[in-house]
Amino acid sequence: MSQAVDLVIFDWDGTLMDSVGRIVSAMRSAAQLSGLTVPSEHQVKQIIGLSLDPVFDILFPGISASQRQTVFEHYRDQYVLHDHTPTPLFAGAEQVIQQLHRDGVLLAVATGKARKGLERMFDETGLRPYFHTSRCADEAESKPSPDMLKQIIAELGIKVERALMVGDTIHDMKMAQTMAMPRVGVTHGVHGVAELSDYQPRAIIDSLPELLPLLGR
């Protein structure tokens, strides 16, 4: 990449953490426990990264407010307490973050998780000290709105052209494209090269360590 980068903004699920399997399993279990039609694995994968309100609109159209609350509670309990699908960091994720931090690059997270969920992941992974700020689903408009990214660069005082969004979904790519922020797609999460390419990323990588040479590291 020819443009210098002062800030790298990472998506979390499917980008830094291999949590797609647990999200899919927990959401399908939540639907079953709530007496709703169980969405397919493919259907759930397509909504990863979005906030829960639009997720419920897509997966369970027409459900009532009380049904939404029931699904939410079942999903939360399944994901946090009952579903034991492993959610490791992707290979090289921690090393990439540490290297960028050592090099003085600002780091942030823009995620469809709620704040409580991201804080729990920060604690479990030990990655909290490396990130200068973050925005979650309950603090901004849902992806693909660029609201999260706008808030982050405003807080850190970074020009949009000197920031980079790294994500695994079309929702990540679209929100960055909407505000002309440079972006890199990662294929080890939800979407592949064909889908990510539609949003003109600077590059598409298969693993996070490939990001470092793109940034001259």
Image (tube, helix red, strand yellow):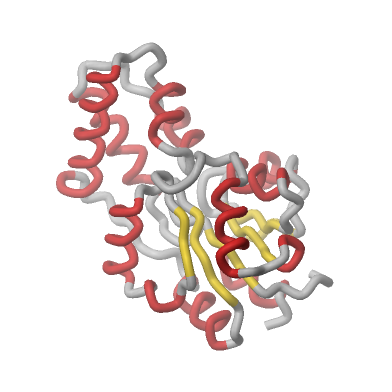
Total numbered badges shown on the rendered structure: 0
Q: Nearer the viewer, residue 214 or 103?
A: 103
> Image height check: is 61 above or below 44?
above
Name the outermost residue toward the right. Answer: 2
Q: Position of residue 25 (x, y in %)?
A: 30, 38
Q: Quadrant of residue 70?
A: top left
Q: Quadrant of residue 122?
A: bottom left
Residue 52 x/y as whole percent: 39, 34
Q: Quadrant of residue 166?
A: bottom right
At 56% from the left and 64% from the top, the residue drawn is 155
> How far from the left and from the top, in percent, is residue 63?
33, 14
Residue at 25%, 45% in the rendered image: 79
Q: Is the C terminus in the top left, top right, bottom left or bottom right quadrant?
A: bottom right
Which residue, as the protein is rendered here, is positioned at the far top?
A: 62
Q: Measured along the vertical axis of the image, is residue 131 above or below residue 192? A: below
Q: Could you tell whether 58 is left or right of 178 in the image?
A: left
Instruction: Report x, y in % for residue 53.
Output: 40, 30
Identify the residue shown where x is 28% and y is 38%.
Answer: 26
Q: What residue is at 35 percent from the left and 42 percent from the top?
A: 23
- Above or below 129: residue 205: above
